[in-house]
Image (cartoon, rainbow, N blue to C red):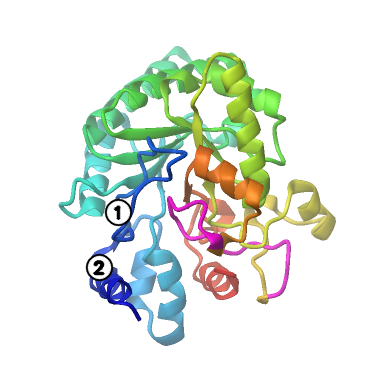
Amino acid sequence: MTRSRLLMVVLVALFAGTGLVVPPATATGYAANPTNPLAGRPWGVYTGKSDGVYPAYQNATGANRALLAKVALRPRAIWFGPWTPSGQIAAKIADYVAKTQRGNPEVVVPLAVFRLWPYSESGKNRPLTSADLAGYRAWIDQLARGIGGSRVAIVLEPDLAVALGGWRPAVRMALTSYAAKVLGGLPHAAVYLDASDSDWLSVEKAATTLRSAGVRYVRGFALGATHYSGVAPNIDYGTRIVAALAQAGLPGKHFVIDTADNGRPFTWSQYWAKHPAGDFDNAEPCRTLTEVRCDTLGIPPTWRVGDPAWGLGTQQTARAKRHVDGYLWFGRPWLVRQSSPFSLARTLQVAATTPY
């Protein structure tokens, strides 16, 4: 083992108990993506109780503890939404950021903003009142106040595409655009608007939706929030969206990809072919290391998107280095229906079968 490699091992061991992921000592952004705000900094690991992961890890022993560490000790985005009132969200997010940064302002804190559905996605056809509209804007304003100048990576409105099939899509796009402008104006917030997945919207529809939702105000967009498609297809899909946005007068956009649950990727149609009576939002975890088209942990969170360890082709690697800011975990396969509650059985299963 070289001296530098030994030092890196020691650093990782020292920081493992702090809740922080330490970047390589030589961390620099890829030359093709020099403005990447996620590169070269540690990403924070949440050690609170809201998603149930870290307490389960703390209470576990033996093999279960080792498996739970694959989730509990890695950066993952905590979701914030209408369950936290406007009067409480500023303090809530400030506390989350502070506890995740642990006194180091250079730590990037991942989070997801899911505020577009005050009556849940199942109420997508329910009209929003003037009070609902004002409440959304007030909530976003308070969220921004709580974040302030902290370094954060925000996935804005996961499942945004659901709005396209609901009540007056333009209203929800306008609200999202407001959030994009407010949050995108924060000094150290890297904001990524949800743009669906390679097996969902067409490139043209995704680009149009992003434009309506205010992508001009933010760093870029996010892919794969509630789907399970592979990294390579999403790199290709995202690259085409970048080109479509550039053609529409919005050049230089970048994107992030969720890799929390696509270790054995599958598309919407592949899922239903395998599980005709299944629940796509609660996709069956893999049962073995060789099973395919099942839910398991994917590439660990990282800004090193072109690492040879990910097994990408030459073309996808080049595209990733140029356009992708990071592989983030904003999907939540450790929760029932990707929402709640925490499931110990699911978490152990996706941890035991991951190829990474």
Image coordinates of residue 100 in percent, x first then y, are: 26, 53
> Disc 1 vs disc 2: Cβ atoms closer than 8 Å?
yes
- Residue at image position (46%, 34%) is 192
The location of residue 23, given as percent across then percent down, is 32, 58
* Residue drawn where x is 20% and y is 48% of the image: 98
The residue at 67%/62% (across/down) is 264
Q: Quadrant of residue 85 in the image?
A: top left
- Mark 2, Cα crowd under 10 Å, few <14 / some 14-19 / many 20+, is few
Task: Determine if residue 203 is in view.
Answer: yes
Residue matched to label 1: 42
Label at residue 296: none
Please tell me in which quadrant of the rendered image residue 55 appears: bottom left
Real-space Cα separation, disc 1 to disc 2, in angstroms? 11 Å
The local secondary structure at tag 2 comes to helix
Residue annotated with mark 2: 15
Relative placement, left or right, of 283 versus 100 is: right
Foreground: 316 or 289?
Answer: 316
Magenta segment boundaries in residue numbering: 290-308
Outermost residue on the left side: it is 103
